[in-house]
Image: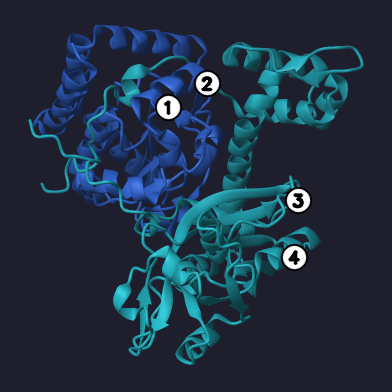
Amino acid sequence: MLLKGSFDSVKSTPLWACAGMVFSMELHQIRYFLALSKILNFTAAAEACHVSQPALSRAISQLEGELGGALFRRERKLTHLTEFGRTVLPSLRQCFEASQHAKVLARSFHHEGHAPLSIALSRMIDIDLLAPVLAELGTAFPSIEVKIFRGSAREIALRLKNGDAEVAIADPLPDEWERFETRALFEQAFGLLLTRRHRLAGRMPAALPDLASERFLSVPECGVIDAIEMEMRTLGVQTVARHEVDAIEDIPSLVRANFGLGIWPLGRPCDADLMIGGIRDHAMRSPVRACTVFGRQHSVAARTLICLLRSRDWSHRRLPAPPHRSVEHVS
Amino acid sequence: MTGASLATQLMDCTRRCRDMDAPLEQRLTVMADDVRRLAPQFAQVVDRMVDRLRAAGAGAEAPGIGEVMPPFVLPDETGRLVSLEELHKAGAVVVAFLRGHWCPYCRITADALAGVEPEIRLRGGRLAILTPEVQEFNAALKADAAADCPILTDLDNGYALALGLAIQLDDEKRSAMLHAGWDIAGFHANDHWILPIPAIFVVDRSGTVRGRFVDPDYRKRMDIEDLLRALDTARRATDRRR
């Protein structure tokens, strides 16, 4: 069969063969560990988990035995996480949260009940990419009401902080607030939108120096133009001139009027009198991430959205792999 | 023996075992024997790992015969959410935890399960395969096994943990894998390095487990005849209740 073995790759050691140490984990052990890591007091953590203190201590010791290192330094008044404890905390917490979410989702799936969900979305992200995910969310939660806000990275960050948006699907956010929990989804690719009469139309992809005198046209806080500007600096050009429009739909008309070179998402249709070019040796790309605020109580709909986005096959959005990779080995 | 030639020989063996016309147990044994022959030191490491997991009672907490299988709602390889409840509409459900598309034993098992799926359906049952891998890789596993069943993403091993089937790999093994060029993080959309213990549950229509196979030794999987017998038990249990 043609597809069989298509994902084999020739590597020196197979994953399953280099089996080293593995640890089994119990849900209750992790629950106690997470409680103690927050409360930092054995007696109080045991109370919070509704177990006796010896039972909690025993479970923590078992987990430490399994993981092969002390998670806590036990001091009478100053119980605290060890370096090792801090290292394993994020993955154990995420696995635990996933198991909690799995439970809640199984309970609330297809059930009625008002479920508002506000999503902040970068202006350049093609809604067609998210439509199937939103449709699935609508099936899962028949009473869901979604609000979608489009904005710049700065506006999106503010909305997240204020709680006006529960989930963001966005370009990298400007200030890396430590409570932003981000997950990479895919990379969005862009091109230059220009008229077929443009002086560079016959010379695409354009060489960077040819663009030094051009004016760019995009939505506010465009990371793609920032990246072009960074490259221009190596040529001694300090800044690139840019126009900003709030609505991406306004870009084609302005390009047509020779107002500038548009920054245009690849895959988004454009009229026949316009063309999409690129820049030689410069990938116009921007990562798209899902972002929430750590520590807030998230709705089951929001968690399901993140789960669907992370699980989704974005491989068609990825840079093509170098040809020497994923070779079917001939026996 | 160079690493590259060993890996190549193991891949050939995987394909040979996957396509072999023999009972699953025999196919897995041939695979394991080939590993032992080609890479005795690897096989020993795996033996030690399995001993350790057995000693720790890994997987013992997973639902047993007569116990209730917790419900799940997980996205399949196309992004559609599939619930255990929905799968139960036809009758009993075979829930199979696999480690992922990269694992030779899981590829062989997926192929065997796909092969027996028509018989599962004849008995009014449905098959669902669960892995911690995202859709792209579940689609690859599905194509590799020419399977007709949904392959579901148990993201971050949440459902596996709820069943006591999650195991974590340590730093040493992580770096060994990364060194070998296997980015399991890329398959899982996280960098937790947590895997499920492979397992198969046969769940009757009321959600009660009627067949169960959990073994920390990932080279051993449920016998297909046992699986079909458990399905018959599940159907009888449902009929009695009517």
Mark toward the viewer: 1 or 4: 4
Mark toward the viewer: 3 or 1: 3
Residues at marks 3 and 1, CA–CA distance in whole angstroms: 32 Å
Residues at marks 3 and 4, CA–CA distance in whole angstroms: 14 Å
| Marker disc for residue A24 | 2
| Left or right of residue B93, residue A28 in this image | right
Asked if residue A58 is positioned above or below residue A257 in the image, the reply reads: above
Local SS, label 4: helix
Chain that appears blue? B
- Residue beneath label 4, please? A159
Q: Are marks 1 and 4 in contact (CB under 8 Å)?
A: no
Identify the residue at image location x=71%, y=13%.
A58
Quadrant location of the C terminus of chain A? top left
Q: Position of residue B79 (x, y in %)?
A: 41, 58
Are tags 4 and 2 found on a single chain? Answer: yes
* Frontmost residue, B232 versus B36: B36
* Frontmost residue, B8 versus A66: B8
Question: Residue type at mark 1?
Answer: Ile
Dot placed on the residue nearer the N-terminal end, 4 or 2: 2
